[in-house]
Image (spheres, grey):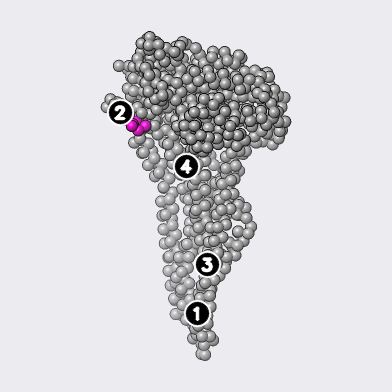
């Protein structure tokens, strides 16, 4: 029997927790959850959509068998048809890490389509309509949950957690939560007659736009740029095509890497390292010569010196050799590792921090993680040992012979070792995706398929290591054969020619160690090359990712800018990549102190307009100078100053790592006082929540916050920035720009009303641009 149950309640009432309980993701202190034995798979759509860095089609189908009819059905139900037609490769378009190339509403609809594509009789949706505009929300709800919707036609059961009360009349059953408990339950008619929580909501149809416009006064209609013809030509799918220089570097190495590594170390550490390595090599090699002189001297008549003389000097040479070896290791471990690791990590971190938004929309998160994990581990771990061993082996082999088989071994091993590094990026990406979407994997019953994919990626990542072990065996066999041939030649020559017995013995002793040392030299040098390959990857990463700050962006307005808050946008077009325009020919004039709501369907460019004003989204070059704020061209303002002066609340709240204090999360710059932080938390109604967890100095765990509380915390940050700026500049509430991107999408109607009243009060004289 088809049944739609809607769960409502104020912010932090336990709606999301109840969803996780039904999925078995939250441990039970008492009671039990009973699901039908046939419900092995649950079509779950999380409040924070989980999307892998794959195509839209792959994200929807996942590990389920592909069925064209079912696929088309869910695309139509979630209104993705228009969006797919506008994308450069349609449903084969990659969404980027965590769906960064899609709008918030598009991500929610793709996540809904994935849940609906799953063949099951039970669907669970956690506030999945919050990021949609009013018209899209109405159509999606009607097509999915309505009387003739997809779920009803399938005869399935659905649970929908929501803050929106406009759809309550469509529910077969309503559950109202408060403080983690059910306060009432039943049909809408029954609950309205109870005169309790649901009755107090005043259920009526009212769009978010109507509510927003009533508060802010002016609306600007944003046309859906994705349905229009694009200025940019559609390009083929982007692929990771390596240049000839990169391929040549893999085959032959890049000598500039040595220079790059040397600069990260400095002159004196490199100088002392080289000197001590040469000293060790001298004493190691000279012991064979000294034994020969000892043998010759004692066999003379009369002996040149007593045995004690030769033994004493031999012991001295050994002690000096060990001391020089200790000095080599000490220079590397205590000096070189710290200098090189910190310098290279700082350079890579600066590259990421200064990278433009386009870089994050086209780069897999696993690749970035690989640089900061695998590459830095090699630089701090493998590289120092490879450097020490290579230097020592070279010093020991000086004067022995030229390195044989190097041209064959190094050329192949270098490529295999670099392939070994790069093969781990897909594995890291899969780890990250699995951690982010673990609840979805379990609900969909995809655990076994995920494990199989992990095993395949693990096998793929280990193939280069296996081949490398094989060519190392080949190297050992080749060098051992060479030593055997040379030993045979030495023995034959010693029997045919008159030569010193001492020198013949010394030659054989040297020859016996020659193979092992030579093999070690080649392997260690190959390891050094690969370890330097990690530096090469970081060097290439820093060189290829150009910083977003461009020449000419050097204007630093006076401290009061932008006090008036007047914005002019004249025919601006912008894109995240070279494939399509996110904004086309945008023309807006916002006067001093106006409150503007940018409206449009999901994916129409509302959030892109906010990013454009923060200079995170790049206009196309021909329109780059067509944006002015208080008469200053946006293209000339220093970006750091711009984002410091304009207050913005993003669509997705961002927090410092777990354990950071509440105060650090509220004021990362550390420019506010404790009393100011307390006052803003009291203003947004979160102070009691913070005090229950230890106060401002206590560690904060963002996962314990509901989505609504996270949005309130972001609002508190904005208010604190406004108050600190007023204190520093000496102005009171008048003057400035506030950008809001769906700041109240996850709160109940009462909290939403309170947030907008707070914004009107705190930012009374500000120009406000809002994407509802």
User: x%, y% of residue 641?
Assistant: 66, 33
* Residue 334, quarter of the rendered image: bottom right
Callout in the foreground (3, 1): 1
CA separation in Å, label 3 and label 1: 22 Å
Q: Residue furthest left?
A: 37
Label 2, residues with CA under 10 Å away: few <14, some 14-19, many ≥20: few
Magenta region, residue range: 24-29
- Where residue 615 appears, as percent x and y from the top left, is 63, 30
Q: Earlier in the sequence, mark 2 or mark 1?
A: 2
The 10 Å Cα crowd at callout 1, few under 14, some 14 to 19, many 20 or more, is: some
Callout in the foreground (2, 4): 2
Q: Identify the residue position indicated by label 4 in the image.
A: 425
Residue at 51% x, 34% y is 695
Q: Is residue 278 above or below residue 759?
A: below
Going from N to C along the chain, the mark reached first, 1 or 4, is: 1
Q: Are marks 3 and 4 in contact (CB under 8 Å)?
A: no
Residue at position x 44%, y 49% in the image: 464
Asked if the magenta segment contains residue 510, the reply would be no
Residue holding disc 2: 31
Question: What residue would you read off at disc 1?
Answer: 311
The percent position of residue 710, horizontal first and vertical second, equals 50, 28
Does 28 lie within the magenta span? yes
Q: Nearer the viewer, mark 2 or mark 1?
A: 2
* Camera sees residue 586: no
Residue drawn at (43%, 50%), measured in percent from left and top?
465
């Amino acid at each position: 029997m088809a049944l739609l149950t809607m769960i409502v309640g104020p912010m932090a009432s336990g709606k999301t927790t109840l969803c996780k309980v039904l999925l078995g993701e939250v441990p039970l202190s008492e009671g039990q959850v009973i699901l039908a034995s046939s419900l092995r798979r649950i079509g779950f759509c999380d409040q924070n959509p989980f999307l892998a860095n794959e195509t839209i089609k792959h994200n929807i189908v996942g590990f389920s068998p592909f069925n064209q009819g079912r696929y088309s059905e869910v695309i139509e139900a979630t209104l993705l048809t228009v969006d797919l037609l506008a994308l450069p490769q349609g449903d084969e378009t990659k969404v980027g890490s965590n769906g960064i190339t899609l709008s918030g509403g598009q991500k929610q609809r793709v996540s809904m389509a994935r849940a609906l594509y799953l063949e099951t009789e039970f669907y669970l949706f956690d506030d999945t309509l919050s990021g949609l505009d009013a018209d899209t929300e109405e159509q999606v709800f009607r097509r999915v949950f309505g009387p003739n919707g997809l779920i009803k036609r399938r005869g399935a059961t659905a649970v929908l957690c929501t803050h929106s009360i406009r759809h309550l009349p469509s529910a077969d059953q309503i559950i109202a939560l408060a403080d983690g408990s059910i306060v009432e339950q039943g049909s809408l008619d029954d609950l309205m007659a109870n005169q309790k929580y649901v009755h107090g909501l005043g259920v009526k149809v009212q769009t978010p736009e109507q509510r927003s416009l009533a508060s802010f006064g002016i609306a600007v209609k944003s046309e859906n740029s994705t349905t229009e013809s694009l200025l940019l030509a559609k390009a083929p799918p982007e692929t990771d095509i390596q240049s000839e220089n990169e391929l040549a570097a893999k085959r032959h190495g890049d000598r500039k890497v040595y220079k790059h590594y040397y600069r990260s170390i400095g002159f004196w550490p490199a100088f002392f390292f080289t000197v001590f390595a040469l000293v060790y090599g001298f004493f190691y090699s000279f012991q064979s010569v000294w034994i020969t002189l000892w043998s010759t001297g004692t066999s003379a008549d009369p002996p040149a010196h007593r045995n004690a003389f030769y033994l004493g000097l031999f012991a001295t040479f050994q002690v000096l050799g060990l001391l020089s070896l200790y000095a080599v290791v000490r220079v590397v471990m205590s000096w070189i590792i710290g200098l090189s690791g910190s310098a290279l990590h700082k350079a890579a971190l600066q590259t990421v921090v200064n990278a433009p938004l386009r870089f994050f929309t086209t780069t897999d998160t696993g690749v970035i993680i690989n640089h900061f994990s695998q590459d830095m581990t090699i630089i701090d771990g493998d590289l120092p040992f490879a450097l020490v061993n290579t230097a020592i082996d070279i010093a020991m082999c000086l004067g022995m012979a030229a390195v044989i088989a190097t041209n064959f071994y190094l050329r192949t091993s270098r490529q295999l070792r670099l392939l070994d590094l790069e093969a781990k990026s897909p594995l890291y990406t899969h780890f990250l995706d699995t951690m982010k979407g673990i609840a979805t994997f379990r609900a969909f019953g995809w655990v076994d398929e995920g494990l199989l994919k992990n095993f395949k990626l693990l096998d793929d990542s280990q193939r280069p290591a296996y081949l490398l072990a094989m060519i190392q065996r080949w190297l050992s066999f080749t060098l051992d054969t060479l030593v055997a041939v040379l030993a045979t030649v030495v023995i034959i020559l010693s029997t045919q020619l008159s030569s010193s017995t001492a020198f013949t013995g010394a030659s054989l002793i040297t020859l016996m160690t020659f193979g092992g040392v030579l093999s070690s030299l080649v392997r260690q040098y190959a390891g050094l090359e690969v370890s330097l390959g990690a530096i090469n990857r970081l060097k290439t990463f820093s060189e290829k990712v150009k910083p977003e700050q461009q020449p000419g962006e050097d204007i630093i307005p006076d401290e009061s800018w932008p006090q008036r808050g007047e914005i002019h946008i004249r025919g601006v077009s912008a894109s995240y990549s070279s494939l399509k325009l996110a904004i086309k020919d945008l023309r807006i004039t916002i006067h001093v102190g106006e409150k503007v709501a940018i409206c449009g369907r999901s994916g129409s460019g509302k959030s892109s307009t906010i990013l454009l004003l923060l200079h995170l989204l790049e206009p196309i070059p021909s329109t780059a100078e067509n944006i002015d704020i208080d008469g200053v061209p946006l293209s000339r303002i220093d970006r750091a100053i711009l984002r410091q002066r304009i207050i913005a609340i993003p669509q997705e709240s961002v927090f410092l790592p777990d354990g950071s204090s509440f105060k650090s999360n509220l004021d990362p710059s550390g420019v506010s006082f404790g009393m100011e932080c307390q006052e803003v938390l009291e203003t947004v109604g979160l102070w009691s929540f913070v005090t229950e967890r230890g106060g401002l100095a206590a560690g904060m765990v963002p996962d314990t916050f509901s989505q609504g509380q996270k949005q309130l915390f972001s609002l508190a940050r904005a208010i604190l920035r406004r108050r600190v700026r007023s204190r520093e500049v000496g102005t009171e509430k008048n003057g400035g720009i506030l950008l809001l991107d769906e700041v109240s999408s996850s709160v109940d109607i009462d909290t939403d009303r309170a947030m907008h009243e707070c914004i009107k009060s705190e930012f009374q004289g500000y120009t406000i641009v809002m994407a509802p």
